[in-house]
Amino acid sequence: MLDRPLYYEKIRPFINKPFIKVITGIRRCGKSTMMLLIQQLLKEEGVASKQIISINFESMKYYDLRTSLALYTYVSDLLKTMESPAYVFFDEIQIVEKWEEAVNSLFLDFQIDMYITISNSQLLSSELSTLLTGRFIHIEMQVLSFTEMLGFRSDQQETQENLLWLYIRRGGFPAVHLTDNYDEKATYMIIHDIFDSIVLRDVVQRYKIRDVELLRRILNFIADSVGSTISAKRIADYFTPVDPATVYAYLEALQCSYLITKVNRFDIKQKRVLKTQSKYYLADSGLQHALCEGKASNISGILENIVYSELVRRGYKVYIGKMGSLEVDFIAEQAPQKLYVQVAFKLESEETVQREFSPLLCIRDSYPKFVVTMDSHFQDTIEGVRHIGLYQFLTDEHLY
């Protein structure tokens, strides 16, 4: 079982507290494993197995519980015969019709410690929050970070550059790293299987997508355009004739399933969020690499995607920066902290150095500023702007 201490430590303070613990994230990122880990740790602390109810709604064993009334009746009957405190774990609860009603009623009618997982962000922002405002805490999981991947691999003698390329190509879905023996072909088979399950189950079925081929083409377009500002209209124009409203609806569905994330631009001079020309990032670099069929033509965009995910993982609110006519790849805020980040593959010419450093040098404040690259040799700090390697940026917990 892959240990995920980053997320367990977020959950630990709320164990045995009167809050529903809601764990969300893209399918196959490790939510089910986290539920099993919590159960294991509870048992190690003296909780008996008969005090735990655990249901994975993807199992046919619980097919008859896929309505709120059936679920409530089944679980309430069990709880009436159980010792207190009781612990309830619902995995992939969104499969249950009107699940929020059952969750709400069980939480109100019994003294239970409840944990649920959801693979759709829209459900969290609508159904559950309406009923349980102030009574749940939310933990969003991501795929394995680069640091987590290092901890699961046995080939510790690999060079830093080789390990980075491994993460770029394979990403962080835990299934890819269960063994060191998967070759590239096997890895992409796993990633494509995960992709298909997300698209078919979490997007097509839930949102009743009519044109599945268009959905896939839009996702491929985003994967190939990571690092560039795009809009629904631009995508619609590219696939003419396509209604921009359809593209917008499909983008919303992809976001709700955690496949992509929209990041808005922020005007640094005017100090306001801009509503146009956003960027989209994928949930995983391996997914991006697989969708692009292993092509490295957009390597800077892939690196940007990895840096974005790391900033979010560390708790930052992230924007794309606009400084006059120049662009800053990321403004990351976590009060009272702020930092600015430029990402490039390598600084192989003076022109590239100028392009990457100039936007940051124009910002006249004292917050940390970084240019992050895959270079093996690094330039000195230029007027307060640090040039560092991607490996250090991803692994140094005290860097920023």
Image (cartoon, helix red, strand yellow):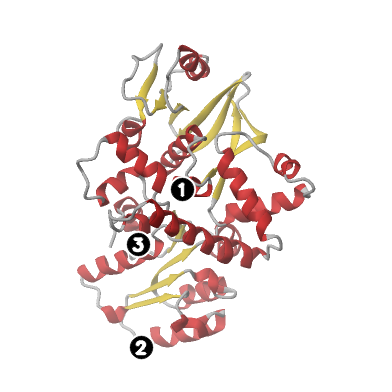
For disc 2, the marked residue is: 81
Amino acid, disc 2: Thr
Q: Residue at point 53% right, 18% down? A: 359
Instruction: Tell me which amino acid carries mark 3.
Output: Met
Residue visible at 47% across and 44% down in the picture = 294
Mark 3 lies on a secondary structure that is helix
Residue 189: tell me if it is visible.
Answer: yes
Residue occupying the point 42% across, 20% down: 347
Whether residue 99 is situated above or below residue 118 in the rendered picture = below
Q: Is residue 178 above or below residue 351?
A: below
Q: Nearer the viewer, mark 1 or mark 2?
A: 1
Q: Position of residue 24 (x, y in %)?
A: 47, 58
Relative side of 52 to 119, left or right: left
According to the picture, the residue beneath numbered tag 1 turns out to be 284
Quadrant location, the N terminus: bottom left
Q: Quadrant of the C terminus?
A: top left
Q: Establish if 119 lies above or below 75.
A: above
**Front residue of this view, candidates 356 and 397:** 356
Q: Are marks 3 and 2 in contact (CB under 8 Å)?
A: no
- Look at the picture and state if 246 lies above or below 298: below
SS class of the residue under badge 1? Answer: loop
10 Å crowding of disc 3: few (<14), some (14-19), many (20+): many
Badge 2: residue crowd in 10 Å (few <14, some 14–19, many ≥20): few
Query: Which quadrant would residue 280 be assigned to in this image?
Result: top right
What residue is disc 3 on? 34
